[in-house]
Amino acid sequence: MGTYSTLVQQQAASANVSIPYMSRRSPVYSTKGMVACSQPLAAQAGLRVLQAGGNAADAAVAVAAALSVTEPCCTGIGGDAFALFYSAEQRKVHCLQGNGAAPAGLSLEAVRAAGITGSELPPRHALTVSVPGAAALWEEAVQRWGSGSSNLADVLAPAIELAEGGFPVGPVASFEWQRGAECIRQAGGPGARALTTEEGSGPKPGQVWRNADLAATFRRLAEHGAAKGFYSGSVAEAVVAAVQSRGGVLSLDDLAAHRTAAVEPISTQYKGQVVWEVPPPTAGIVTLMALNILEAHGKQQQPAHPQPAGSSSSPVNFGEPKAAQWTAEQLHLSIEACRLAFADALTWVADPCVHEQPLQQLMCAERAAQRYQQPAGLSPAPPCQQASPRHTRVVVDGEGNAASFIQSTYMGFGTGIVPEGCGFSLQNRCHGFNLDPGHPNSLAPRKRPYHTIMPGMVTDQQGQLVAAFGCMGGFMQPQGHLQLLFNLFELGLDPQAALDMPRFCIDRIDSSVGPASVCESHLLLEEGLDGSAVQGLQDRGHSVQLRGGFGRLVFGKGQIIARDAGSGVLCGGSDPRGDGCVLAL
């Protein structure tokens, strides 16, 4: 009685206005620049670079470095990175692949000689360390796409300050940190103390954390560049020593040979928009194939929702209140589309420098129609691996340039190996190889494994930016991309509401096993999905498990910034499953 919410309802009723708004918070608006990521202090790092005259690429690298400090369980300079950059001047999407190769000394014969007899590399073994590609990509992105007013030292400065001065750890980051600290304890070594407490755990929520070793690593990178400051010299020597002392084979020559690759992104059309992803060996093609299957099925030819009266020219809803939920049929069709796309990807996707990728055949309309002629008769999805930590961030500047970046150490803290004096852990990406010598994704020296991380971008038919987006979370990522795009362009939700919408996750896909994964199969559904839709999935034969609380992390953490081409207005959202936010100029 007399509460604020009651007053609002009374005022709405008197004005004959319904409030069907489902989002947990409002989207953020701006015209001069915007940063969305999973950690507020990292978002501030990006905003600071924008304020100093940097562009979206400069700011995205600043955010990436800051996240390496504030959320090291999920991301870091010891892992890989991928980036999409939209040039407003060129109306073109560019792509960089920062994924490192397996060591030259890592072969199937070497694996068997090490006593490993199973079908996959042990997930935390030192043999799973591939060349970390993030540092080289950061430098390449600033040099190739940056404003020219900021250099690498400028964009790394906020992260260095955070590492040296300390920062309070967020609650979700603390949960993931404490959960992942066990692998650092198991790996041991003098470097471990940089990422764990005296008790060998992670920091508590609100605890101030410093990482002087990582600050020193960033200073070397800023001063000497990637080639001399990371891939050779004292950092490289510490990395190699840490890996080889634990039975790995990574060498200084492996590090020195690394290069970032500039490649053409791949795309498909969905709901009249052009969706862009990073090409193989990443999982970006999974989203595109799944979208093609949905389009081919013909259940949703065009967005059913009309453009709201007086709205912008953008195909994205910029905040018009809208109530929407997935139906059981929509969920089932999308789940089966993801299942089919994963089956194709885990059969074919591998390092394109070693195995030619049949992209046209996999992504053509004829194959999509063939794959989904009778979806209602399909059985539920096969098993799929739980989401692994990594981080996505999106930035759009005042000129309309956009960057969608993602980086990861794969599983939480990767191998858990922390090189002495460096302040970061090393990824375990070679665990993604298949040990079947006849498989395209089979392990081989200097080969790049199947990769889960994937940034996303959307443009219209004229090449104008519609949205930069991403959704971290291992094999959840293609599923997350599909769901965010469905929420935006089919359900007509604004970016924040699209991120807030409960999700599904097909559990336990594994690239090291391939399409024949035979683990226990079940479908994870986030609490909050419509009850009738959940029942409808069960009626269709899906084995369902509901997840809430910190269990929601399996559904990934996404970020979206949309742009209206007519007005230049930006509209951003940040995933409520993380500690993050959207900050705007």
Image (cartoon, rainbow, N blue to C red):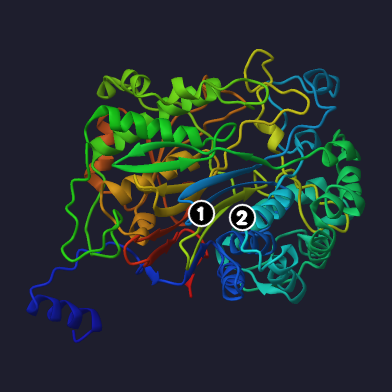
Q: Label 2 is placed on what type of residue?
A: Trp
User: How many neighbours does mark 2 have within 10 angstroms: few (below 14), some (14-19), or many (20 or more)?
Assistant: some
Seen as rendered, the residue at the extreme top is 438
Q: Label 1 is placed on what type of residue?
A: Ser
Question: Are the residues flagged by discs 2 and 1 in contact, CB closer than 8 Å?
Answer: yes
Seen as rendered, the residue at the extreme front is 89
Q: Which mark is residue 87?
A: 1
Q: Where is 147 relative to 483, above or below?
A: below
Q: Secondary structure at mark 2?
A: helix
Compare residues 395 and 179 and report the one nearer the observer.
395
Compare residues 307 and 505 and report the one nearer the observer.
307
Q: Image point 87% across, 59% down: which residue? A: 421
Q: Position of residue 254 (x, y in %)?
A: 84, 36
Q: Position of residue 53 (x, y in %)?
A: 60, 72
Q: Which residue is mark 2?
A: 145
- Can residue 66 be spotted in the picture? yes
